[in-house]
Image (cartoon, coloured by chain):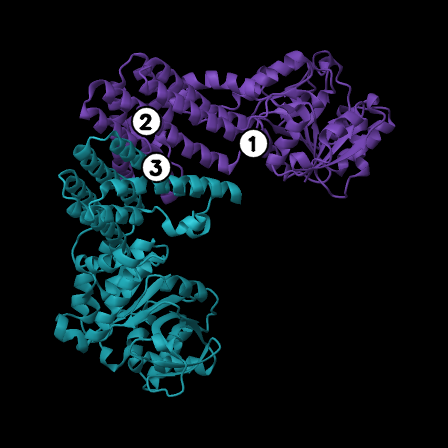
Chain colours: A purple, B cyan
């Protein structure tokens, strides 16, 4: 399936801040149009047609043939871009292949990462004379409602569209699954002197041929500096995974998202952040070993925060990789090991108690158990281990990494490393035994 | 799909040794007929019809309605069992449902665990007027060829069968996928006074209706004490998994199969053996700690051997469970931990060197890495981690549990625990780093 991106307009309202064509405005490390290309690529779209107008050269120079993004890009230039976006969309007729369905998208509308898959799935059912339009009924959540193209919807059909529509119950998200019928409607309305996409969609809507797909994810039409900032917010918030641990959710993400926002414009990769996180663990270990428990504790918490940043950057910039996931989980084990070694050394060197060694060793054995259990469970049972389902009452104290490092931080700042180590020794093994007992009971 | 088991004969030749009906003779912990029922159940067969003759009551009393084996069993009694096994098979006509395909099997033919799945898959293609017969062309590997029913095969069709056949190129394994056509052939040949299954199969073979499935696994017709002993051998050998580590393959299995043979007739479960293996690890740790390194080393090797026995018993007695697999891998980690703790304590208490603690801790961190890596890899990449493929030159020294415990044994018996610990610290982490490097390179 091919995607047509409209990038013909002048985008005057963002010009003062960014001094570049709007599709090329960078937001959290990617230009708007790059984000949409990578977003679509993630859903399996590899061929793109970009309709340029005002800034033809700049856009072509920036994106080239698409190699650097791992896709193929063709350009069509619309010299009459000033007339309206319908004329730009109509330019695609030169490239259109009979019977083809194509995605048509504004290059400056940004969607949350999960938004597209259900849209493409819904588009399977539309016929050759129809159009599927992504729209949003959650009017209270739509950003800058006034600027949106409104839609009067009946069930899943659009009746009428228009910016000034008074009787409406949804808005147009600027994402279409087009067919040959759309190009015909564009021809007709352009012949009549009506040059916007909305004009031709209205033509099809009159015949009941505009189906609606209602979005459940957020999206933003990046039009001015306010919407640009709002878009940053929405994207950053979308990076929080649903299965976050309690410390991650309530503490770490508040900081990690800020770091992600700072790092996004740089060329740093998720794997580099993973490695830096290991270095921070080593620094934490050294601080513990040289009797600076407060610094050690804070660095332990910082490595826990960085443990979130690599994933956030990966999701934000479409850099997720299988190797990254593996690398992250192995390096985390080394980070844990170093920190606990530092803590144990601190306890032992200050007291000379053998207990310190025994507890330290027991923690070392307990640290990887949570991950071991989950990964093995998933391979054996063929389904993910879900703490909320399988950990019973222990789910509130699950000895996941965020909780373990938080305990270490507490132990550091109140200078009670022995207590922190004993707690870790108990909860990591208790959790493992309980999980065995519980899995046995459930199956 | 239903299975019909023939258990009507007198089985005189095993009577002297076992004093019980042949189907009920126990071999490696299961009676012959129980083994076949569980074997078929593993392939998805849950309904059984057992044709009894000579020992109707004994067999019914022993197996009951099948609840204890997790299947349903119906019995049909053939008072004329002395006439021949064709008459016994023909008894099934009372139960036969139009259009049904059914497995027909001798209750005293024993197959390797993998033998059945490909047979059932091949049987999908046979038509209502055909028969599929499992046969074996590997004549040099067939046990007691003289006693077998021979088959003259052309491609995958049987031309003629007979015990005394001189021109043959395969033998009949006593496993059929039957259709209504077989029951009709049985009727016809019984009417003519020909009472064996072979007689009616020959009737169908004349019309080219007997298709052959050629076995690639071993099987034994348990007929006398010699074949009984041979069957034990074949089954035990079949328990060795293809992916065995080098120490497992060359050393451990030689002992573990003997232990399995001893334990099979008892009621001990695989999970109990897993737990005993942990206790042996604890004993090894204590021996190391009280400066009996030879005993410690030997017990470490023994726990490695027991680590094979649980799986062997599970496969041999159809007791494999997902929980067992999970339980085994978690308890192995605790066993490893205890042994290394004992060794480290021994080194440290005799020298007071901090190096001992550092090395011990590094080994503790390295021990779970092999498993962690493999399990995570499998979940991330969706395919199993195969040492031979992914470990490059390190595959010969893969730090799997069998190798690790062997190094510990060597360290114990030559009384060089520090050396053993240092080797373990090096190979476990080296392997992890190499694997990361290699996975990164390959993808």
Quadrant of the image containing the C terminus of chain A:
top left
In the picture shown, does residue A69 fall above or below B88? above
Does dot 2 land on a helix, a strand or a loop? loop
Does dot 1 land on a helix, a strand or a loop? loop
Q: How would you rate the neighbour count of disc 1 (Cα within 10 Å): few for under 14, some for 14-19, many for 20 or more?
A: some
Q: Is residue A425 left or right of residue B98?
A: left
**Between A432 and A340, which is closer to the camera in this rendering?**
A340
Task: State whether residue B36 appears in this view.
Answer: no
Contact? badges 2 and 3 (CB < 8 Å): no
**Residue drawn at 60 percent across, 15 percent down:** A230
**What residue is shown with label 1?**
A319
Instruction: Give the chain letter at badge 3.
Output: A
Q: CA separation, marks 2 and 1?
A: 29 Å
Total label count? 3
In the picture shown, does residue A275 fall above or below B157? above
**Between A101 and A76, which is closer to the camera in this rendering?**
A76
Q: CA separation, marks 2 and 3?
A: 12 Å
**What residue is shown with label 2?**
A399
In the image, which is nearer the foreground, mark 2 or mark 1? 1
């Amino acid at each position: 399936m091919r995607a047509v991106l409209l990038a013909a307009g002048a985008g005057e309202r963002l010009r003062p801040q960014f001094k570049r064509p709007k599709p090329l405005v960078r937001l959290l490390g990617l230009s708007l149009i790059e984000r949409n290309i990578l977003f679509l690529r993630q859903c399996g779209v590899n061929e793109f047609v970009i309709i340029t107008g005002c800034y033809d050269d700049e856009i072509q120079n920036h994106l080239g043939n698409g190699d650097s993004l791992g896709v193929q890009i063709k350009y069509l230039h619309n010299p009459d871009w000033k007339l309206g976006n319908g004329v730009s969309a109509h330019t695609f007729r030169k490239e259109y292949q009979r019977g083809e369905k194509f995605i048509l998208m504004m290059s400056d509308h940004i969607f949350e990462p999960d938004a597209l898959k259900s849209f493409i799935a819904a588009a399977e059912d539309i016929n050759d004379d129809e159009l599927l339009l992504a729209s949003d009924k959650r009017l209270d959540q739509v950003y800058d409602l006034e600027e949106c193209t409104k839609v009067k919807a009946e069930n899943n059909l659009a009746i009428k569209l228009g910016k000034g529509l008074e009787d409406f119950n949804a808005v147009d998200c600027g994402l279409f699954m087009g067919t040959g019928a759309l190009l015909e409607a564009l021809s007709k309305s352009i012949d009549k002197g009506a040059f916007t996409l909305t004009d031709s969609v209205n033509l099809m809507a009159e015949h009941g041929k505009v189906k609606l797909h209602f979005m459940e994810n957020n999206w933003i039409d990046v039009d001015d500096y306010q919407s640009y900032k709002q878009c940053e917010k929405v994207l950053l918030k979308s990076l929080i995974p649903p299965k976050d641990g309690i410390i991650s959710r309530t503490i770490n993400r508040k900081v990690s998202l800020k770091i992600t926002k700072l790092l996004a414009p740089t060329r740093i990769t998720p794997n580099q952040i993973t490695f830096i996180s290991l270095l921070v663990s080593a620094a934490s270990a050294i601080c513990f070993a040289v009797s600076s428990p407060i610094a050690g504790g804070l660095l332990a918490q910082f490595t826990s925060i960085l443990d979130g940043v690599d994933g956030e950057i990966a999701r934000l910039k479409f850099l997720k990789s299988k190797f990254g996931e593996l690398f992250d989980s192995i390096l985390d084990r080394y980070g844990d090991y170093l920190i606990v070694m530092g803590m144990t050394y601190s306890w032992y060197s200050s007291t000379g108690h053998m207990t310190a060694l025994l507890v330290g060793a027991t923690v070392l054995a307990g640290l990887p158990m949570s991950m071991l259990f989950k990964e093995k469970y998933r391979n054996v049972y063929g389904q993910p281990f879900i703490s909320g389902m399988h950990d019973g009452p222990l789910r509130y104290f699950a000895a996941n990494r965020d909780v373990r490092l938080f305990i270490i931080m507490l132990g550091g700042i109140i200078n009670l490393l022995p207590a922190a180590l004993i707690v870790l020794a108990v909860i990591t093994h208790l959790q493992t035994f309980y999980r065995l007992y519980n899995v046995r009971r459930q199956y």
